[in-house]
Amino acid sequence: MKLKGPVRALGAMSGTSLDGVDAAVVETDGETVFRFGETAYRAYSEADRAVIRAALGRWPGEPGVAEAAEVVETAHAVVLSGFEGVDLVGFHGQTLAHEPRGRGTHQAGDGRVLAEVLGLPVAWDFRSADVGMGGEGAPLAPFFHFACARWIGANAPLAFLNLGGVGNLTWVDPSKSAPEAEGALLAFDTGPANAPIDDLVTARRGWARDEGGALAASGQADAGLVAGFLDHAWFHRVPPKSLDRDAFGALVAAVDRLADADAAATLAACAVAAVAEGLAHCPTPPERVLVTGGGRHNACLMAGLKDALACPVQPVEAIGLDGDMLEAQAFAFLAVRVARGLPTSCPGTTGVAAAVGGGVISTPG
């Protein structure tokens, strides 16, 4: 697929928090961000979430997967059809299982279906090529983070921290010539973030999330459980590295004996401790940490990060970006890179042997 000049790309993201579908337009040539465009959001209903949650950890052909894919495709079709003047769509799908050293990676949702429904070319299946070449397949937003660092005119290393269901960190040196250049990026999952807290309050209180971190802020973290959490073999692995949403499933069970508020505070403290451990792997300390994803709305998480880290911690809104839409924007940006045959991951972001361009393009008809 040949595209010339800036492209009006529409990206979508359905994250591990299972809240809904974010959609956003970016005008880009796949290297430079020229303009951020319109955004939209379509929440999953409780019934939608139940269908997707029932399929977590499952692979193509297993029970519940087809039903989850239909929910994902329908939700995306609804929100993406509301945009006009789009050249290309980036569709990530919904991660159900991620096992890069085993069965691979599985995102529910078929880009061919969306291409037909929307009447537009769709870039999708972003992770399989990376995993097939020995990479972790995640995280994939770092190439976009590099472009964002350039967009804000950063001239010193900084870090983007995405607090979704899982936390992931991108250390960026914007002085490098390109995201795939040696030393430009280091990216990896830090550990669980919102997912255990969400699962806890869903099970105990029927809430989708701990709104604003109010429950966690009213509790007291169990220091012994946090210390035990940091003994997990995950924290001894050198990045790049990536996690499945439920890789720390035992963490929620570990707080069973605690009252609701103390359990939420402990899970929040674990998320913060995981980030602090992760920052120790950065080539140089970042000038600042810019937080994106739903976790930045959790005041308990943000306060914990500010106490634990030795540099300023800010939501990405402080530099003019939209933390609710950054991942959707990333897949708009990556879609253009796929269309132009540019790399979408490299050794510093996923541990893949060499820079690789992931994704496939499906066209209507």
Image (spheres, helix red, strand yellow):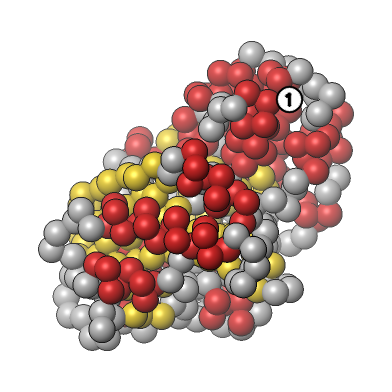
**Left or right: 267 as drawn, with respect to 333:** right
What residue lies at 75% left-to-right and 46% top-to-bottom?
Answer: 249
* The furthest residue to the left: 85
Residue 321: x %, y % from top left? 32, 44
Residue at the spot 37% in from the left edge and 76% down from the top edge: 112
Q: Is residue 295 above or below residue 10?
A: above
Decide if residue 298 is in sight here.
yes
Packing grade of label 1 (10 A; few <14, some 14-19, many >=20) is: many
Which residue is labeled 1 in the image? 263
> For residue 188, what is the image quadrant?
bottom right
Total numbered badges shown on the rendered structure: 1
* The N terminus: image quadrant: bottom left
The x and y percentages for residue 7 are 20, 70
Residue 191, position in %: x, y? 67, 48
Q: Quadrant of residue 129?
A: bottom right
- Residue occupying image coordinates x 65% and y 79%: 134
**Vertically, is 130 above or below 21?**
below
Q: Is residue 259 left or right of residue 215?
A: right
Q: Is residue 192 left or right of residue 81?
A: right
Amino acid at circle 1: Ala
> 337 or 308, which is in the foreground?
337
